[in-house]
Amino acid sequence: MKDTTTETPPIPALSGGKTAFFFDVDGTLAEICAGPDDVTLPAAVRDNLKALAAATSGAVALVSGRPVEQLDQLTAPLKLPAAGVHGAELRDFADNLHRVTLPEDVARALQYQLEQGMAGMPGTLLEAKGMAFALHYRQAPAFQQQVLQLAESAVAAYPELMLQRGKCVVEIKPRGNDKGSAITTFMQQAPFSGRIPVFVGDDLTDEKGFQVVNAMKGISVKVGGGFSHARYRLAQVSDVHQWLESLQRHLTVTHKETKS
């Protein structure tokens, strides 16, 4: 695994007819904010995603910890194939939504336990996603260990659930679903199948995706520093925006030349 941005080579030139693109959102396409509701996606990024989708016959998907509904709100009016809640939700190119659910009694019991536990930790935030829960402590980093212990104690009673750590967040989600499995599912379906996968992400939650893409001999791109299985790097979100802009311009021109 690589630890610096200087040791990785430049991202290679890509062909719209041969590649499929997968993007994380928070920390990748959008800057991380104090709270998840504060995040926005610049209009230029939405436009570039739309152009990239057109140039690749629709082989562009979002792969995020956010629910699919929130992803649609961020990209509106653009609506892309998407995997939400780390793969527990997946909407394919044909607009079919597949969702893993928790029994209602389990979801209610978990939410009550987490709400009670986090009530004594000012500045923390519990985000209920239906089949998953995110325990945020970005505004209260002193509670990191207590949040982790709370999540561990909550999961201990439910073997069907697991923990996923991220940047200033601990998530409780259904076992067996991650960004790697989501990308694998997309790559078995049109218009993604038969293409080379490209996945861009920034967090621990993206590492499974990087590993799957590497196994498929694709392009894995980590945003920021730190250890990663990704083979390429971009330093920050603004670099993702610049790369996306140049990428869609190149692929749009190539796509038009191919059709003419």
Image (spheres, helix red, strand yellow):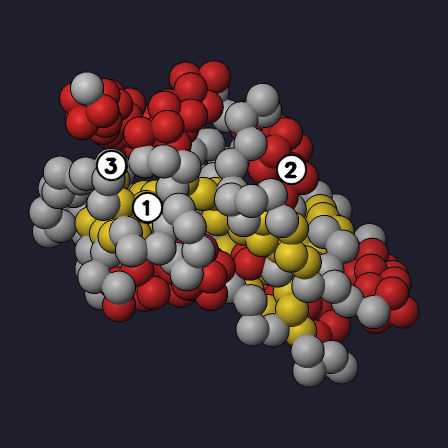
Residue 66 in view of the camera: no
The residue where tag 2 is placed is 70
Residue at coordinates 23% horizontally, 56% vertically from top-left? Answer: 218
| Left or right placement of residue 260 versus residue 70 in this view | left
Marks 1 and 3, how far apart at CA: 8 Å
- Give percent across and percent down for residue 255: 23, 26
2 or 3: mark nearer the eye: 3
Label 3, residues with CA under 10 Å away: few <14, some 14-19, many ≥20: many
Q: Identify the amino acid type marked 2.
A: Gln
Residue at coordinates 29% horizontally, 55% vertically from top-left? Answer: 194
- Place residue 176 in its image quadrant: bottom right
Q: Identify the amino acid type marked 1.
A: Ala
Quarter of the picture containing the N terminus is: bottom left
Residue 134 in view of the camera: yes
What SS does tag 2 mark?
A: helix
- Give percent across and percent down for residue 245: 28, 23
Query: Along the polypeptide, which appears first: circle 2 or circle 3?
Result: 3
In the depicted structure, whether residue 143 falls above or below residue 211 = above
